[in-house]
Amino acid sequence: MCSRDSGSATGALILNVLGVVATACHPATLRAQEVAPHAAGAGLDALVSEALAANPEVTVAAQRFEAAKTMIPPARTLPDPTLNFSYEDMDVDETMYGVSQEIPFPGKLKLKGDIASREADAMEQEYLAVRLAVVARLKEAYHELLLADQSIAVIEKTRQLLEQLAEAAEAGYSVGRTAQADIFRAQAEVSRSLARLAMARQRRQSVNAELARLLNRPAGTSVDVTGELRPRAMRRNLADTLALIDQSPMLRARGAAVDRSNAVLALARREYLPDFEIGLQGVHEDPMGDDGYQVMLNVTVPLYFASRQRYGVREALASRASAAGEMQALRQELAMRVTDEFAQIDRAGKVIRLLDNAIIPQAALTLAAARSGYNVGRVDFLTLLNSLFTLQENELELYSETAEHEKARARLEEIIGEEP
């Protein structure tokens, strides 16, 4: 027969554990127990600066832009002149020497320069688009890492509470207050929490690897971050954001491609016109010692325009139509993406408010009620555990929705080129 003192001590232990559960799971306490920033961690702004300076994709895009700019002056320059020299050993020895220069029809060199310039413009916009894409991927990974840290903290807290409940159940069983099944169930849930911790830590390692890649750090480098996982307010509504699509570097790159196609078409039409070659030669004859010179003018004749220049124009027309179609298709795609991201942000915001203001407080009250009921024998151990896990899942969902909210904002920034 169990003594009253032993039962009182066991009941006090259970009450103490359940009091810790209720206190730790209260919404205000949840905010206070968020993962503390790493002492040597980096903030988001510092990570962005590092990525823009070190990421290979950004470096490659910058070099492509620089290479495209170097093609503009050569495209506007005349072809190299030709020096010539000849000698004839006959009755009268004749020595000829001179220079010739090809001169395209007026306007062709300018159009070639315009083509190269538009190509450089496209490379510049692609470079800016790559920068924005890298920053967006970095911000997504950053918030995924914060989410992983918060998830690990929540699951670890639940595991510790389950271990305390298991100890309390064992103590209660020893004095006849609880069933043996409660012990097994608590121990099983501890094991399940360990499995979830392993999954959460694996996810953190994967996100850490992605961050290290974006930062161009050695493989296996640990990236510690600081910051708070919280939703930020939008600065613009959907209509205002859609109006900013035309300033997207992705769309501007396609616009530069259309401008390049227009210049290519103008040059193709100008190919119907002839090019010129001007030459000047000096002549010296021996043994008479006579000197002279001759001026030469060559003109190309576009005789085969029906099978060459005409098809060149057709090709340029088709390329221009293709570039314009791609630009319009991209504009529609970006508009769809903006609308979709806004829908995700709106949904996440509503869920966050419900979880923060209603669902989590209600779940905390449910857990408190289950604690009281279990203490007097009106609620079984399974109901108590379900209340605890319901609160845990709501808390994890809150952090997950917050991360999705911020990731959608990062993707919007990639599209419009500035903070949404």
Image (cartoon, rainbow, N blue to C red):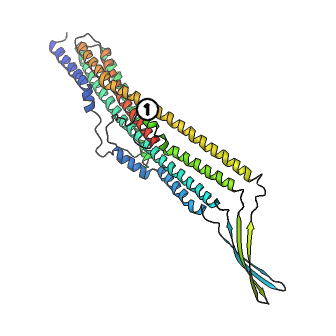
**SS class, disc 1:** helix
* Observer able to see residue 397: no
Expressed as whole percent of the image width and height from the top left, the position of residue 263 reads 61, 52
Image height check: is 75 above or below 347? Answer: below
Name the residue that disc number 1 marks.
342
Quarter placement of the C terminus? top left
Expressed as whole percent of the image width and height from the top left, the position of residue 144 reads 39, 36
Image height check: is 193 above or below 45? Answer: above
Please tell me which residue is depicted at 29% across the width and 29% down the height of the picture.
Answer: 157
Residue type, label 1? Phe
Expressed as whole percent of the image width and height from the top left, the position of residue 405 reads 39, 33
Image height check: is 318 above or below 366? Answer: below
Image quadrant where residue 185 sits: top left
In screen coordinates, is 203 left or right of 299?
left
Quarter placement of the N terminus? top left
In screen coordinates, is 13 left or right of 83?
left
* Observer able to see residue 378: yes
- Tag count in the figure? 1
Q: Camera-side residue: 292 or 181?
A: 292
Please tell me which residue is depicted at 18% across the width and 19% down the height of the picture.
Answer: 12
Q: Camera-side residue: 81 or 275?
A: 275
Please tell me which residue is depicted at 46% across the width and 38% down the height of the picture.
Answer: 243
Expressed as whole percent of the image width and height from the top left, the position of residue 133 reads 47, 44
Q: Camera-side residue: 10 or 379?
A: 379
Please tell me which residue is depicted at 30% across the width and 15% down the height of the picture.
Answer: 381
